Amino acid sequence: MAKIRVLVVDDSALVRSLLAEIINRQSDMTCVGAANDPLVAREMIRELNPDVVTLDVEMPRMDGIDFLGRLMRLRPMPVVMVSTLTAQGAEVTLRALELGAVDFVAKPRIGLATGLQELASEIVEKVRVASVAKFRKPAPVPAAPTGAAAPASTPPRSGLLGRVSTEKLICIGASTGGTEAIREVLVAMPADAPAIVITQHMPPGFTTSFAARLNGLCRITVKEAQHGERVLPGHAYIAPGGRQFRIERSGANYMAVVEDAPPVNRHRPSVEVLFLSAAAAVGRNAYGIMLTGMGNDGARAMREMRDKGSYNYAQDEASCVVFGMPKEAIAHGAVDEVLPLNQIAPALLAKLGSATERLHHRI
């Protein structure tokens, strides 16, 4: 079986050496070259035809974001970003994911040599995933909402969901490729949508910027979840990186629980944790959505949600960057509908709208 051919692009000689060593230790991959800036990398890509590129952000002559944008326009290929774990680094990394990068590794600011070695398993796993990831043209980022008419994918009546939104809860799980998939779902949500709770696999330091970026694009309020806050309609709550996030019921209200609990399925936050809590606390008032991602995190819990009466959606293989988590959820019998990404929000909103109409008739 052919090895995964990896090109390392980083202005630090130490990082280039460390990444090459980590890659070459793997039996299924090889570092075919290392470039110290994007212009050198451009020529090496032409000559070496790598399967995956690891790309730094801050480099001389051309920064990694400019290079990534050009690469995705001219020669799209799998890219794993290597970004310093800072607020600025998080913003830049999210922009890279918008441009088409498959995933990212949070590079430590201090103790670089030790830190990268500790991240070795994460680095090679993400390179493996990137090597088989599907490409789709990056969707244009919509302008910030102005309160004007809803997009065509949303129901025509803005008050359609108001009568049931306080009872319902939408639960979303995602991993590789999920930042853009989540964005596509959330921008379609009307201001009076039911509360939405989200677990996206992310390290500490990135979810705050991710939530802020989405909040500027959506009509609902998007924020990082805080322990003990009430989960409200018209809001989306993102699990903080490095912590577990679940839902509890307090009377008629849903409450956010954010805690320093151990990893589940090797993840913190874990989709399993959030979905199991939804099964227990929300039951038939929950709607589950499993988006693109590697692995099986959340599949068993999504089946538990369905057994308790939830209605669940999974993203289809053709629109996934990685069809791992949705595939596992489907295999577990946890899914009611499998849809392309751009059809999930309209289908959910139509389902919510029909539920509202039934409620009106009963009243």
Image: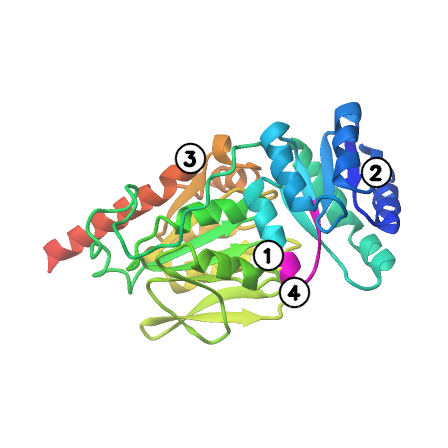
Closer to us: 313 or 186? 186
- The first of marks 1 and 4 along the sequence is 1
The quarter of the image holding the N terminus is top right
Looking at the picture, which amino acid does disc 1 mark? Glu
Whole-percent x, y for residue 343 in the image = 36, 38
Residue 299, can we see it?
no
Q: Which residue is mark 3?
A: 340
- What segment is highlighted magenta in the picture? 81-91
Q: Secondary structure at mark 4?
A: loop
Q: Position of residue 5 (x, y in %)?
A: 78, 30
Q: Earlier in the sequence, mark 4 or mark 3?
A: 4
Q: Is residue 89 magenta?
A: yes
Mark earlier in primary sequence (3, 2): 2
Farthest front residue in view: 61
As displayed, is residue 221 above or below residue 316? below
Q: Could you say where residue 236 lies in the image, as x and y percent from the top left?
A: 42, 61
Question: Is mark 4 in CB contact (under 8 Å) with mark 2?
Answer: no
Do the CB atoms of the residues marked 3 and 1 lie less than 8 Å apart? no
CB within 8 Å, label 3 to label 2? no
Looking at the rendered image, the disc whose residue lies closer to the viewer, 3 or 2, is 2
Q: What residue do we see at 43% from left, 39% from top?
A: 341
Q: Which label sits on residue 34?
A: 2
Q: Is residue 126 left or right of residue 231?
A: right
Residue 194, labelled with which disc?
none
Q: Is residue 81 left or right of residue 334?
A: right
* Residues at marks 1 and 4, CA–CA distance in whole angstroms: 27 Å
